[in-house]
């Protein structure tokens, strides 16, 4: 039990302890408060060879699982043993007072496509009359390399992208602001310890290399994407912004959320087999201008984070500290559990009604989307993953007036 007032039962109890960053330095959250980790290390309360005296989490990420666990165990002790209260409490700051920024410097960013329901829905919407899944889908976790430089922290405004798209029935494309701006609710995994170029890591190495989890919104301009994606995959339709939560939940905080992942048929290649195959029971929630429109279940993802991790390196590609890989859109079997508005409105043909009566298919300027999630914690507790939110701003004038 923690002595921090209000923390127990808040979703940010002592079993959670996510990490964040401000211009001032690193913080660990407990309840509605955060502990200044640089000050804590300076006071000799916790030791991490100076890794907590940093503007971002990267040094702690690189320090490895042993350090992650030592620091976490020590923080747990500081927040539970009343003997430490006198010195720790003055170092706590209300989280609302923090101007949070991106918690780690993103190295490479990869996005997967691991929900069978999402892949099937997109197949039906985009390739009607054909098999919903492409022939490779059950054999490997499909993914692409995204743009690390445009990963932004929760709360960052998202400017509507301009680009080329081809209107239905037209022969040639037009240029202008995206008219089909969408979201993808995903779960991102943050790589801590790197690997050597030329070596593959196995599914069993996942927890030794992956530090933690963030909710992620892969903003997607469907009209730009539809015109550009063949044959090389997503490009400008997704690279304008990818939002992540400001607090990174340590993987160790999700131990009680591990659940059996779906059985895979056909059997997967050896390097994708898992000695202890598991997904995570994260219950996502998508709020559109204040109305909850969907509740995607992460537990039903066909490809697990450990399989994505092994697939990412099977060719010898190296992992770097700060690499971020995302699960792909989290969609469950129900329409009200889909993770994109493309699916929720079935290609824009079935609008959703928000509180107050407004209807939507895709995002309008000024719209806000917030993704939240909860997970089972130890002993019946609940962990709240930090939200990822963003508001759409109108396209820039320079974009509007561009002409070819
Ligand atoms: Ca995606």
Image (tube, helix red, strand yellow):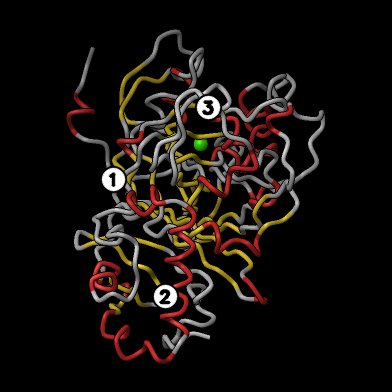
Mark closer to the chain start, 1 or 2:
2
Vertical arrangement, residue 160 with respect to residue 213, above or below = above
Image position, residue 41 (x, y; %): 28, 70
Label 3: which secondary element: loop
Image position, residue 45 (x, y; %): 32, 76
Q: Quadrant of residue 263?
A: top right
Between 332 and 166, the one lying in front of the other is: 332
| Residue on which the image places disc 1 | 393
Tally of numbered discs? 3
| Residue on which the image places disc 2 | 30
| Image side of residue 46 versus residue 310, left or right | left
Q: Nearer the viewer, mark 1 or mark 3?
A: 3
State if disc 3 and disc 1 touch (CB < 8 Å): no
Measuring 36% from the left and 52% from the top, which residue is drawn there? 390
Label 1: which secondary element: strand
Measuring 28% from the left and 74% from the top, which residue is drawn there? 44
| Residue on which the image places disc 3 | 199
Q: CA distance from mark 1 to mark 3?
A: 43 Å
Q: CA distance from mark 2 to mark 3?
A: 38 Å
């Amino acid at each position: 039990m923690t002595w921090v007032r209000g923390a127990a039962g808040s979703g940010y109890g002592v079993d959670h302890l996510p990490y964040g960053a401000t211009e001032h330095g690193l913080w660990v959250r407990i309840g509605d408060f955060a502990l200044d980790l640089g000050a804590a290390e300076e006071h000799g309360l916790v030791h991490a060879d100076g890794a907590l005296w940093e503007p971002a989490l990267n040094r702690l990420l690189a320090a490895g699982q042993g350090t992650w666990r030592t620091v976490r165990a020590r923080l747990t002790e500081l927040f539970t043993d009343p003997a430490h209260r006198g010195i720790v409490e003055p170092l706590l700051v209300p989280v609302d007072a923090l101007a949070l920024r991106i918690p780690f410097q993103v190295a490479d960013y990869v996005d997967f496509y691991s929900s069978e329901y999402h892949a099937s829905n997109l197949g039906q919407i985009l390739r009607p009359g054909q098999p919903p899944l492409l022939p490779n889908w059950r054999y490997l976790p499909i993914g692409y390399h995204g743009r690390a430089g445009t990963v932004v922290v929760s709360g960052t405004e998202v400017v509507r992208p301009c680009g080329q798209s081809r209107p239905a029935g037209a022969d040639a494309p037009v240029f202008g602001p995206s008219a089909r701006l969408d979201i993808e609710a995903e779960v991102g995994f943050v790589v801590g310890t790197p690997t050597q170029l030329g070596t593959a890591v196995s599914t069993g190495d996942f927890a030794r290399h992956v530090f933690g989890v963030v909710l992620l919104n892969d903003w997607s301009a469907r009209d730009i994407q539809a015109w550009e994606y063949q044959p090389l995959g997503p490009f400008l339709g997704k690279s304008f912004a990818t939002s992540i939560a400001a607090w990174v939940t340590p993987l160790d905080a999700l131990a009680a959320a591990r659940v059996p992942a779906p059985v895979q048929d056909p059997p997967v290649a050896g390097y994708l087999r898992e000695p202890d195959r598991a997904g995570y029971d994260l219950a996502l929630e998508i709020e559109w201008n204040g109305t909850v429109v969907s509740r995607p279940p992460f537990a039903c993802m066909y490809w697990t984070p450990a399989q994505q991790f092994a697939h990412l390196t099977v060719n010898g590609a190296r992992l770097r500290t700060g690499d971020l890989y995302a699960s792909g859109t989290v969609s469950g079997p129900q329409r009200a559990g889909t993770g994109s508005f493309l699916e929720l409105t079935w290609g824009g043909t079935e609008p959703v009604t928000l509180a107050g009566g407004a209807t939507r298919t895709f995002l309008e300027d000024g719209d806000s989307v917030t993704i939240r999630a909860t997970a089972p914690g130890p002993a019946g507790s609940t962990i709240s993953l930090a939200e990822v939110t963003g508001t759409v701003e109108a396209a820039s004038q320079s974009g509007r007036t561009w002409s070819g």
